[in-house]
Image: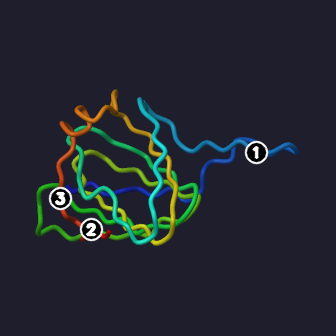
C-alpha cells in the first residue's frame, strides 16, 4: 500500500495563558531540525528518502505539496496545499516536491541522525515529480 503524507492543520494547544501560548507541533525521535527558506515560484525537494522521515512546519508562506509512491512513475500524483501554521509528515519511500507559491519559511524535523551532505545524498534519490523552476 502506498504511503501518503499526513497534514496536521491545528497544532495541539498545551496551555493558553496571559503571557502567551505553548503548542505541541510534533513528537518523535527527531535527530535534526532544519530551517529552510524558499522564494516564490521555486520548487524544492523532487526526491524521496530511503530511510529518513520528516515533519515540516510552515511558519511563513504557502506551497503545493506533490507526492507519489517511490519508484512507480505510473502511480497517481497527489497534491495538497500547505498554508502557514500547518505541518506535513513525509514517510520514507514517498516521492515529494514542493512548489512554493509565496516566499516561505519552514522548519523540518528529521529522523536522520546526521544531516551532513554525504549522509543526506546517500539516503536521497532524485526524481522529477514536479518540473523545476528558476
**Residue at 11% across / 69% down in the picture?**
74
43 to 6, vertically: above or below? below
Image location of residue 113, percent across then percent down? 34, 27
Tag in front: 2 or 1: 2
* Residue hosting label 1: 21
Do labels 2 and 1 touch, CB within 8 Å?
A: no
Give me the C-alpha separation between circle 1 and circle 3: 40 Å
Mark number displayed over residue 132: 2
**Residue at 20% across / 41% down in the picture?**
50
15 to 88, vertically: above or below? above
Q: Quadrant of the N terminus?
A: bottom left
Mark 3 or 2 closer to N-term? 3
- Which residue ends up furthest to the front in the rendered image? 134
- Please rate how many residues cluster around mark 3, counting C-alpha atoms within 10 Å: few if below 14, some from 14 to 19, many from 20: some
Mark number displayed over residue 127: 3
Of residues 100 and 110, the one drawn nearer to the viewer in this rendering:
100
- Left or right, 16 with respect to 104, comes to right
**Residue at 31% across / 61% down in the picture?**
97
Q: State the SS at label 3.
A: loop
Amino acid at each position: 500500500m502506498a504511503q501518503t503524507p499526513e497534514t496536521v492543520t491545528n497544532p495541539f494547544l498545551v496551555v493558553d495563558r496571559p503571557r502567551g501560548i505553548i503548542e505541541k507541533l510534533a513528537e518523535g525521535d527527531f535527530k535534526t531540525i532544519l530551517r529552510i527558506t524558499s522564494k516564490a515560484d521555486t520548487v524544492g525537494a523532487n526526491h524521496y528518502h530511503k530511510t529518513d522521515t520528516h515533519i515540516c512546519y510552515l511558519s511563513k508562506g504557502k506551497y503545493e505539496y506533490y507526492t507519489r509512491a517511490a519508484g512507480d512513475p505510473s502511480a497517481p500524483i497527489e497534491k495538497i496545499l500547505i498554508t502557514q501554521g500547518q505541518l506535513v509528515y513525509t514517510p520514507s519511500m514517498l516521492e515529494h516536491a514542493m512548489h512554493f507559491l509565496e516566499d516561505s519559511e519552514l522548519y523540518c524535523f528529521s529522523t536522520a541522525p546526521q544531516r551532513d551532505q554525504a549522509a543526506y545524498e546517500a539516503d536521497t534519490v532524485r526524481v522529477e515529480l514536479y518540473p523545476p523552476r528558476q
